[in-house]
Image (tube, rainbow, N blue to C red):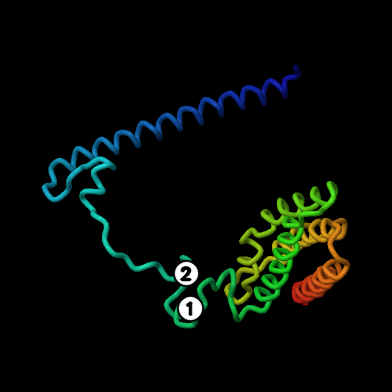
Amino acid sequence: MCIRDRAYETIDTIEHIHHHYEDAKQKRDLADAHKKFFAELKDLPHIEVVTISELADKFPTRKVKPPEQSSWSTSKEDLSKKNYYPLWKDAGNRIHQLQWEHINICFELADEAMTLENNTREGKQFAIIARGLLDRAVHSCQFWWANKNHGMWDVNMINKGLIQQEEAEINAYKSIKLSSVDDDIKRKFYHKVAAARDIANKIRDQLIA
């Protein structure tokens, strides 16, 4: 072992000891803070320490109002306009509209591929791949970073989501194509693939504008 390797090994060992010490110290400090907190609670007459199982008796079931459709980012103004998810599905955001049009076609293709009864073994495999890819293709980052008006804009993140959707779409249609369903159904879903391709081009045109 050369001197440089020994030096790196020594540094790594020291860092490991330091991190272990810091982690132990943090846990000890947190435990002390908890002890202090509960000790102080005993001196407060309006606070009672109970177990989780006792909470049901302390807070009996009452009639509640279901929460409105919304997210942490939804404002009162957004709710009045029924714009429940402005950072992910804003009716006034053209790219959001196109993104959801595209992904809804992917959902249709994947659903059809997964529910085909008389599919070939290879076709079923493509359907399973499409379904797995679609789970990853629905990540929220692609919508979040399509908010230029809010200062959140990343063309690569938007395009990455689009690519993932297209991968699911291709596998789903391949599954349908390999199945024994009527040619009319295959043609119907091919037209959906063509429509998705057009939507994707419209999104990318806005990314490079």
Kindly identify the residue that appears in the image at 79 percent across and 50 percent down.
Answer: 124
Q: In which quadrant is the C terminus drawn?
A: bottom right
Determine crowd level at label 1: few under 14, some 14-19, many 20+ residues with C-alpha closer than 10 A: some
Question: CB of mark 1 within 8 Å of CB of mark 2?
Answer: yes
Instruction: Give the mark count.
Output: 2
Q: In which quadrant is the N terminus drawn?
A: top right
Kindly identify the residue that appears in the image at 75 percent across and 50 percent down.
Answer: 128
> In front here: 130 or 160?
130
Q: Mark 2 points at which residue?
A: 70
Which kind of residue does numbered mark 2 sit on?
Answer: Ser
Q: How far apart are marks 1 and 2 (CA)?
A: 9 Å
Which kind of residue does numbered mark 1 sit on?
Answer: Asp
Kindly identify the residue that appears in the image at 81 percent across and 75 percent down.
Answer: 198
> In front here: 30 or 122?
122
Determine crowd level at label 2: few under 14, some 14-19, many 20+ residues with C-alpha closer than 10 A: some
Q: Which mark is residue 78?
A: 1
Side (left or right) of 189 relative to 55: right
Judged from the image, the secondary structure of the residue bearing numbered disc 1 is helix
Side (left or right) of 104 relative to 19: right
Q: Position of residue 191 (x, y in %)?
A: 83, 73
